[in-house]
Image (spheres, rainbow, N blue to C red):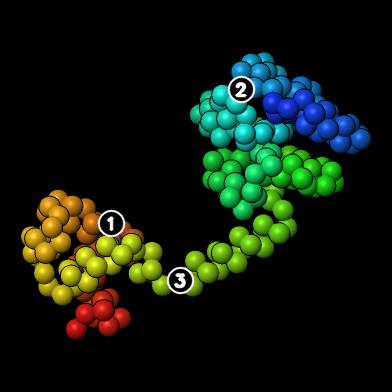
Amino acid sequence: MIRILIADDHPIVRNGLKQIISDEPDMLVVKDVSDAEGVFSFVQENELDVIILDISMPGTGGFEILSRLRSNNIKTPVLMLSALSEELYASKSLKAGASGFINKESAPEELVKAIRKVFSGGVYVSSYLAEKLAVNLKHDIEKPSHEYLSTREFQIMCMIASGKTVSEIAKELFINVKTVSTYRSRILAKMDFKNNSELTNFCIREGFVK
């Protein structure tokens, strides 16, 4: 039996979710709560298999609740629920430690599918978003490394490659030497260079400096 906790501040939403889940013989809503304290007090005393957690609750929101759960070593799979944009919040949810994201407008069968997926140890996003994330990942892989630099970082990289010292760059850009050094460190890290020599060789090879 998959034991589920529902956390949402809207009674209508909670009742709707319970109704959908009640039709599944292997699922049971053991508790539904409306705020963060309800979540924390229940998880401390009870065994759960899945938590369905609304992102936009008053007071302590879903992301903060998720963060506290993980910091307290509570590893129960969390399925984030929201009426907000899937494209904006699904990725953020996964990065925050959730096992999945589902939109409140999803079909009932999608909710059931999502619960089963995260319960089995998987990660759930809609098929639409999965395809979009795959496309974005492909574009990121194909993206030239220097395109990850900001305009100022690229400018300073080229100035370093042209042979200018940190002091000369600081004077020309009207910033202090420490700031230039910080930019240099950031550039080397982003470009995976070990030193100025590698940076210079790259810029010459790409035609950024002569």
Rounded to the nearest whole Å, what is the CA distance between mark 3 and mark 2? 41 Å
Label 3: which secondary element: loop
Could you classify mark 1 by the number of other residues whose Cα lies within 10 Å: few (under 14), some (14-19), or many (20 or more)?
A: some
**Whole-percent x, y for residue 58 in the image:** 60, 26
Could you classify mark 2 by the number of other residues whose Cα lies within 10 Å: few (under 14), some (14-19), or many (20 or more)?
A: many
Q: Considering the image in quadrants, where does the C terminus appear? A: bottom left
Q: Please give the name of the residue rendered at 34% of the width and 63% of the height, measured from the top-left corner.
A: 149
Question: What amino acid type is highlighted by mark number 3?
Answer: Lys
101 shown above or below 163: above
> Which quadrant of the figure has residue 51?
top right
**Whole-percent x, y for residue 116 in the image:** 78, 42
Say which residue label 2 marks: 36
Work out whether residue 95 can be spotted: yes
Earlier-in-chain disc, 1 versus 2: 2
Asked whether, in this view, residue 6 is left or right of residue 68, the answer is right
Pick the residue in front: 97 or 20: 20
Q: Please give the name of the residue rendered at 77% of the width and 31% of the height, measured from the top-left corner.
A: 13
Say which residue label 3 marks: 143
Residue 40: assigned label? none
Pick the residue in front: 152 or 52: 152
Contact, mark 3 vs mark 1 (Cβ under 8 Å):
no
**Whole-percent x, y for residue 112 in the image:** 82, 42
Say which residue label 1 marks: 186
Question: What amino acid type is highlighted by mark number 2?
Answer: Ala
Pick the residue in front: 196 or 82: 82
Label 2: which secondary element: helix
Q: Please give the name of the residue rendered at 57% of the width and 40% of the height, measured from the top-left corner.
A: 97
Work out whether residue 122 can be spotted: no
Q: Please give the name of the residue rendered at 66% of the width and 18% of the height, measured from the top-left corner.
A: 38
